[in-house]
Image (cartoon, grey):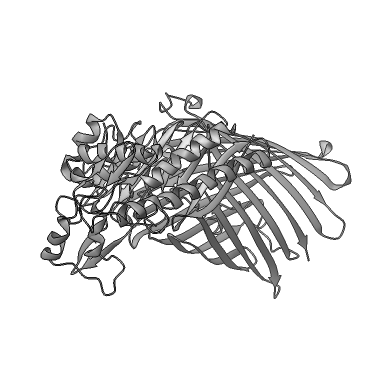
Amino acid sequence: MRLHRFTFPAMASTHELVLGAVDESHARRAADAAIADVARIEAKYSRYRDTSIVSAINRAAGGAPVAIDAETAALMRYADACHAASRGRFDITSGVLRRAWDFKRAPPRVPAASEVDALRALIDWASVAWDERTIRLPRAGMEIDLGGIGKEYAADRVATIAIDAGIANGYVNLAGDVRAWGGRPDGAPWRVGIRHPRVDDASIGGVEIADGAVATSGDYERFIVVDGVRYCHILDATTGWPVTHWQSMSVAAPLCVVAGSGATVGMLLGADAPAWLDSQGAEWIGVDAEGNLRGSP
Amino acid sequence: MAAAAALPGVVPHAAAQSIPDEGSFSIRYLDYRDWQPGADRMRVRSPSFFVMKPFGGSWVAEGSLVYDGMSGASPRFYNTLSGSSGEGVKDYRTAGDAKLTRYFDRYAIGVGLAGSTERDYLSKAASLDLRWWTEDRNTTLAFSFAGTSDRINSNNEVAVNEKKHTLDYLFGITQAINANAIVQSNLTYSRGHGYYDDPYKLLDDRPDHRRIVAWLTRWNQAFPAQDAALRVAFRVLHDSFGTTSYMTEAQWVQGLPQGFTVTPGLRYYTQSAADFYKDPPLPNGFVPGEPYATDTRLAAFGAFTPSIRIAKTFADGWSADLRVDFYRQKSEWRLGGDGSPDILPFSARWIQGGVSKSF
């Protein structure tokens, strides 16, 4: 039994897949199938692809309902649960805020409160009409995106496909969202380090997991600094403004989609995150705005 | 480790009273890795080069260069990283030293410089060493002095431009007992101040100064009839962190036909924990403002290191050797007290080989 490592590009990032297998060809076949599914999920749910179901839903905003399949309905159901858990701060219709918040603009600019407020009228998951077969965004200009869910769901799919292909031990790291299964071939758990929110290649600690996932949400992926103030890309859907309470939040959970949304919701809940995460029974490590480490008991 | 080699007491001075007849160079390669149950930790691959040349009848110049390529080192202790790309990052270290020694009739004076650089650590050292010997050359007294200046800039910005300064002193005596036995005894004292924390460990806060006193004695006994030699060593060390350690080692050098020697060895090491070492889990025992560390290198444990070295000398001044050391550390192997609880056994192995030539 050896560990075989594959790296592959998808979703504008590079990902890592490690599979335990006796022979390379077995690992290769499993990796090909898993990587193909990541590409399938990206094609289906990327808001950057005109042919994706997300683009179709967004184009039809204010118009007719769009038919969705069971997989998409399951993701909507999960997004709905996150919306409720975060008391509306996690909202898959909040992507419209990109029109005000441009984190790539040079020189960086903080939008006027009026610009943000105008967009808030388009953020309203509660008004979206959806069921197991169709979805309809009620107002033109509304849009959804599955940031915080889609990539994490893909990580869980990778694990399922690899396990079905007979790979008993492995992990996948999709741009920092890690799903592991089976532990290491020698019986020890995988060790997943948590990236330091201010230093690229340093870690603040780590967790050991045999079966499960660790995901991290942080203020360091995309941000602008204006007049010494950092504005990160994690925006509170209820205010339209970036969160400031945490530099990063990492959550361990059985599934990556739970860990990923837990980390994002944790960032959004600010000072309320520890109580909420603890009530969910989640294992978590957060770095607060001053750089202090906090964590589950 | 070249910087360390410039420090007093690291390189034995035994039987080095007279100027070497010929120069030599060697090329070596070290492969090191360590692990704990279920986790490969660190790997180092390290080529090195050493040259020594007498010149002008009373001078000896020597120097070395070493390159360490490290992977998986702390803080990259994990299989993968959550939060950004999980690509492993490699680190490296380059070190070199140079030393010039002038030999006189009854004494020698040497000066050395050493430096090493890695991404987060820069070290510079200078040393001076003096040796006197009796006319019959049976007794040598040595005194060395070295100063080291380090600068630490950790990758995680916990340590920014931190400094550490260390002064080391050595007093040693080497005495030939008879034609087949030589004994060496060194007393070393080190005092340093500055940054001693491990910036990659959480809540790691150590004192800003450290004093170390160590006493090392070696005995080399030759057995000409057996074409063999026994080397034994014992060292006791105490430092102001509160650690006391004992090391004892024995090696048997056995000559074999055709220029081979085989040297099996066994070393035992045991230490008490530093005063501020706290048993896991973090943050057990943490009191803000007081020294605190959970670094298991500061814990109480014992360790055995069996080793074997095979060397062969060839006709025209060439020689080659291969050495393997295996280190195994466990809490329960501590002597004279309980080992620290809840620490996984730690293992390491060194494989090193080299060729050298006299010229």
Q: Residue furthest left?
A: A114
Q: In this view, does B338 lie above or below B351?
A: above
| Viewer-proximal residue among B185 and B43 | B43
Is residue A290 at least partly visible in the picture?
Answer: yes
Quarter holding residue A251:
top left
Q: In this view, does A167 lie above or below B119?
A: above
Residue at 22% in and 30% down: A279
Q: In which quarter of the image is the C terminus of chain B?
A: bottom right
Residue at 31% in and 37% down: A78
Percent of width and height locating residue A63: 26, 53
Quarter holding residue A167:
top right
| Viewer-proximal residue among B340 and A216 | A216
Q: In this view, does B35 lie above or below A105?
A: above
| Viewer-proximal residue among A2 and B332 | A2
Percent of width and height locating residue A128: 22, 45
Task: From the viewer's perspective, tell me whether residue A206 is left or right of residue A247.
Answer: right
